[in-house]
Amino acid sequence: MTGPRGLLSNAYSRAGRAAQNARGRGALGRLGYHRLFDLRPPNSIPPVWGDLWHLYQTVLERKPSLILEFGSGCSTIIMAQGLVDNGTKDPAKIVSLESESRWAKISETTIPDALGQFVEIIVAPVDKAEHSGVPVWRHQNVPVGAPDLVYLDGPALTPDRKIAVDMLDMEDRLAPGTRLIVDGRSRNCRFLADEFSRRWSRSWNRFTKQTTFDLLA
């Protein structure tokens, strides 16, 4: 979008995102969770407080038993904290797939000790592939199972490959009610929406830049 209306819309989105980050930082700070990420190295992606607050609230509200995450980092830590705070009798778990072994090791060693038992980090390199004639990424070592919450924030995209198709590979084994949250990756979202074989609802948050899919049937 260009022109005055486009500039106004972009300014509104930036202001909204800044406000959401401030609210998230304040909310997590009041819980004492703003220090959970202190062990992350300086060259890693810093906490995006609005996104982390949204993920934490999602875990509290939905009480998932198995979270599958593509791409590890601050999100791994805050979702694990959400699992702890749910206090369910049956231990819940987050499995985080990391395409680079170096970052998998960093994620493993920077998870606070109290959260470690709820997290499994798996090195899952990606293969170049095609789906419906489109260049895509597909992870190796994706565990067999039926997560009820999936967070898609990996692998790193390249100009010629901006789509990961692992969700299509696992769609048949998911139960109705499964939620998928995609961080950015608008082209990937459009591709998934077109290629899903089951019924999903879809919504987009302009401030977090996240798309949410819920499996209906």
Image (cartoon, grey):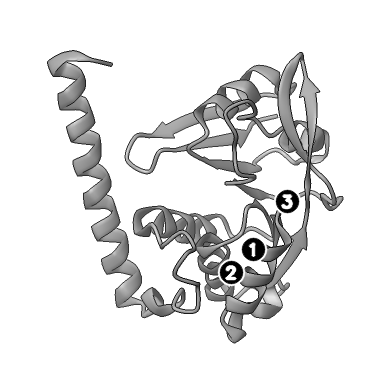
Of residues 94 and 110, the one drawn nearer to the viewer in this rendering: 110
Task: Say if 72 sits above or below 26 in the image.
Answer: above
Q: Residue at coordinates 75% horizontally, 21% vertically from top-left?
A: 197
Q: Residues within 10 Å of mark 2 (few under 14, many from 20)?
A: many
Task: Say if 3 sits above or below 68 in the image.
Answer: above
Residue highlighted by disc 3: 147
Residue highlighted by disc 1: 103
Q: Nearer the viewer, mark 3 or mark 1?
A: 1
Calculate the distance from the C-alpha at mark 3 to the C-alpha at mark 2. Answer: 14 Å
Q: Quadrant of residue 123?
A: bottom right
Residue highlighted by disc 2: 80
Q: Earlier in the sequence, mark 3 or mark 2?
A: 2
Kind of residue at badge 1:
Trp
- Pointers 3 and 2 in contact (C-beta within 8 Å): no
Q: Earlier in the sequence, mark 2 or mark 1?
A: 2
Task: Say if 109 sits above or below 3 in the image.
Answer: below
Of residues 114 and 87, the one drawn nearer to the viewer in this rendering: 114
Of residues 144 and 128, the one drawn nearer to the viewer in this rendering: 128
Relative image position of residue 130 (x, y in whole percent): 79, 22
* Quarter in which the N terminus is drawn: top left
Task: Give left or right: position of 107 versus 122.
Answer: left
Relative image position of residue 88 (x, y in whole percent): 64, 72
Q: Residues within 10 Å of mark 3 (few under 14, many from 20)?
A: many
Kind of residue at badge 2:
Ala
SS label for mark 1: helix
Q: Earlier in the sequence, mark 3 or mark 1?
A: 1
